[in-house]
Image: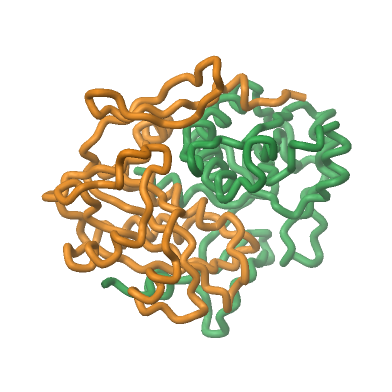
Chain colours: A orange, B green
Amino acid sequence: MLRDLVLKNRSYRRFHQDQPVSEETLRELVDLGRLSASGSNLQPLKYVLACTPEVNARIFPYLAWAGYLKDWGGPAEGERPMAYVVILGDTTIRADAGVDHGIAAQSILLGATERGLGGCMIGAIKRDGLARELELPDHLEILLVIALGVPAETVVLEEIGADGDIQYYRDDESVHHVPKRSLGKVIVSVL
Amino acid sequence: MLRDLVLKNRSYRRFHQDQPVSEETLRELVDLGRLSASGSNLQPLKYVLACTPEVNARIFPYLAWAGYLKDWGGPAEGERPMAYVVILGDTTIRADAGVDHGIAAQSILLGATERGLGGCMIGAIKRDGLARELELPDHLEILLVIALGVPAETVVLEEIGADGDIQYYRDDESVHHVPKRSLGKVIVSVL
């Protein structure tokens, strides 16, 4: 059931850094993005793939992790992502990719989950620096980075408390808790 | 396999208007959206659901269909959607929903496909008119409309020809053809 996959597909930020992700897997995942809907079918998305320790280490410094965990600067050496999919918008095709990268990223992450992987869509990117590091031409704009690997943390969904706080948090056992609005709160009306 | 679901999940614009979609199904689909990733976990998305002929008929005039099919004004009576999910951004939570609605819409449509339904994400919306029709408060901004039903058309993926044209088209048998960029064309590099 897709619901099981959606539930299992949490945002993971710590990984088994000894368990690689193959280029072939990345290609299969990007193919899921490619086959997903695109506004006016323009298909402005392009992709850069990385799955070697050397390249992963070059990408990592340009990413910001888990804004609500103030005491955590991101995954330590040994629990870092083993692959990245950098989603780009080709501005010669369309100036603004709309939500195409959200659609594609969801297909990619659901596909990763099905393969026993997990990951995180990262929007907090030092874009200028990463574009230089990857030697991207000006017409390819960095939209999202998807970090991937075999998850090495437990993520649990929670109901939002009376205070309405949506900030995720880690407990004493390093379990990551994510408060979600209830279905009743997000459905405004059934007409 | 998710890949089968992604392939089956085409943008459908003609439906069996005699085959209803239940409110319960819509709630299950929206729940898939609710359980999907949200930037900074802010969860600004809200939803309005419609699945009665009366309400569907009120929503339909505010939507634009298949821009590349110049001779087709959208689905005729008898092949119109049997349900809508209107995705809203609650601007009191976040001014800009980012790509949250793309992520959620993909989960919703994959869930619909799994249930033998199909649909189309519609961004070409007469937003002011629809907001008035639905009596939406100012802080709920219309982001996307997902039209749903049991598909009554065949959609086929095609390779893009030498001219690079990405415009979808219908053949003499009313089969809908959608040219997609190849995997080789969307992967810029493997580093």
Question: Which residue lies at the image location 79% right of the left edge and 40% below the top edge?
Answer: B78
Outermost top residue: A162
Tell me: B158 left or right of A64. right
Q: Is residue B57 above or below residue A28?
A: above
Residue at the bottom extreme, as displayed: B162
Q: Quadrant of the C terminus of chain A?
A: top right
Residue nearest the viewer, comparing A51 with A22: A51
Measuring 39% from the left and 69% from the top, which residue is drawn there? Answer: B183
B171 left or right, relative to A63? right
Measured from the top left, where is residue A25 in percent x and y?
26, 57
Give the residue at x 57% y 84%: B163
The answer to which of B183 and A71 lies nearer the viewer is A71
Q: Position of residue B71 (x, y in %)?
A: 81, 65
Percent x, y for residue A15?
22, 44
Eyeballing the image, is A129 above or below B76?
Answer: below
In the image, residue B179 above or below residue A151: below
Camera sees residue A97: yes
| Total residue callouts | 0
Left or right position of B117 against A69:
right
Residue A144: give x, y in percent of width and height.
45, 58
